[in-house]
Amino acid sequence: MISQIILAAGTDLALLVAASGPFSLARWNDILEEIGGNRRKSFELASAEIESSLDPVYDDLDGDDSISDVRGDEASLRSLVERLGCPRPVLERLLAKTHGGTALASFVKRYQAEAIKAPAKSARQGVIAFRIASTSVSAKSVEVLNQDWLKQFLQGADSVSIAAGYYDVNFIDLQLQKNPHLKNIRLLFNGLGGQRLEAQFNELTLLHRTLSTRFKLVEIRLAFAPGIFHTKLFLAANGPRARALVGSANATIAAFSKQRNEELLVALPEAGALVGYFEKAWSAARQLSQLDAAAKSLVAFFRTGILYFKPTSTLTTTINPFRELISKLSPTDQALLGGIALPHADPESAIGAFNLKRAVGNQSLLSEVESDEDDEIARVINASIKPLSIETCYGYWVPSALDGMLQERLSKAGSQKEARLLQFSAALNDVSDTDLVKKYEEYLEAVGQALKKLPNGPPVLTRDPYDTEPFSKFVAGVKRQLEDDERRKRLTHPFVPGKIPEIWDDALAYEDFLKSFFEYLAHIAQRGSKRPNVPGKILKKIASDDSADTTTLRQGFEKILKVNGWRSEDWGVP
């Protein structure tokens, strides 16, 4: 209870810890010892000691340390920056101006006293005082940024305006609920392009319809910047007066979650200048009813596509517990072993791996083992991917308007391989685990007999290659992959789709993507009239010849987009 009284009294304890206060000096000294302080000889010294003991600045610092000690200690500097909420350059400047022999406690007390006076001084000068909130950074001057914090900021406003590069309709809906004073809502988001713009239009139209049932005026517009409309601004107004939040957080659930990105927002109680900014951006944006699905910039165009890539997952059906042993054999010994036939094993130069497909005894499965899979993948690329894509450093860029056509082609290409996997899965399940282990033991026994014929015998190993437990785990893992429909599809499809990564505000990543995109177009341009479908349509729009370089192609395409845009029907799809 005493600690709560002290904390409630704040940092000014002069009235509480005094001769006229509730306790004697002896009792205050007892309290000091309870909270980790030192006994003092006067009320004034006891008050100062209590203040220091309760101040979080001293959780990991000692108030008796000298300023000269603090200046050269990186950990102390970091702690002071966090605990005082003082920018590092400002702190270092203040420490440099303070005498090195000054106690840290004296420095902190002066700093905090000035900080308390600052708001009143700023108000007289017309400077805006502000609050800071962060999703994960904890400091004395930083509040916890989450959805409740934002809802509290917006509470009581009769008008809310939000501008954000990215948004989440569920987040918007939740944040604007249970606000009886709210009448007017304006939402300004980054506009996409092509089919993604069509999906965005449908999504926001539904949001507009939902919000309009609860609020008097709801308007939604989209901003189309050359790259991306990247603003993060929340305005809450009561009549002509508005307050604002600005920072890094978008209007999404993820942005206000501690488990995701680190985000920061600054709350300004007076937002006249930012209201002006919003109004300007708002007037330049397009209403939903005015939207044109045509992509009119490179970024908008790229966003109309999907990236396809070759999956890294493969089904491993062989196991060789003798890899370590082989690595320790001489070339002569390896050659001796290479001529020995092992049961259920692949023929190799030394000791072949045990092959599950050979072990289940289905000869039709061995054709896949002996086939050149690289040739098959190359055929699929040429027959399916290349005509409908642009090859980039991040994968094959495919217009989403043609994605259905490509998916159909890839499904046909993967159907034969999936049929073989299902056949193998059935054959594997027809053999009991006990019989599989027996076949594996036959393989191990054969290898053991072969190793006895080596002139110097087998080398010493760190692990026992004759242990069957790793084999049992291997078989169980193969069965799990074959029984998982999603995993099996991934294994049978030579390429899988993924969303275009948001690389537009990463200058290096975006430049790499651009370079590879137009380098591929320049390569295709040299073919003359023999051009695949997708790159051919772009080159035809640009009216390029076979000598066009990447810069010329990029500039020409940017001009086409700016003037005419690019629509789904430009790919030949209605």
Image: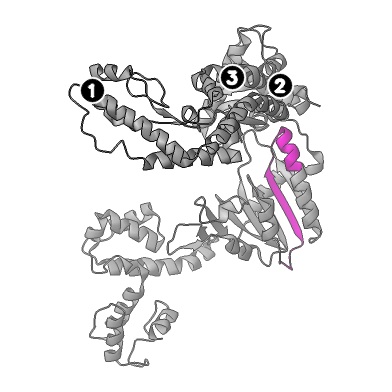
Quadrant location, the C terminus: top right
Q: Nearer the viewer, mark 1 or mark 2?
A: 1
Instruction: Give residue 41's position: percent from left, percent from top.
Output: 22, 85
Residue in the foreground of this view, choosing between 554 and 252? 252
Residue under pointer 3? 518
| Magenta-drawn segment | 179-201
The answer to whether residue 322 shows anywhere in this view is no
Specify the amino acid type for callout 3.
Phe
Q: Secondary structure at mark 1?
A: loop
Give the left or right position of residue 34, taking residue 213 as reference.
left
Q: Nearer the viewer, mark 3 or mark 1?
A: 1
Residue at the extreme left of the image, as rendered:
456
Q: Quadrant location of residue 160?
A: bottom right
Q: Which residue is mark 2?
A: 560
Image quadrant where one finds the N terminus? bottom left
- Element marked by disc 2: helix
Q: Residue at x 33, y 40 (%)?
A: 467
Residue 88 spot, x, y in % from top left: 37, 53
Name which residue type carries label 2. Ile
Q: Which residue is mark 1?
A: 453
Q: Position of residue 429 (x, y in %)?
A: 54, 38
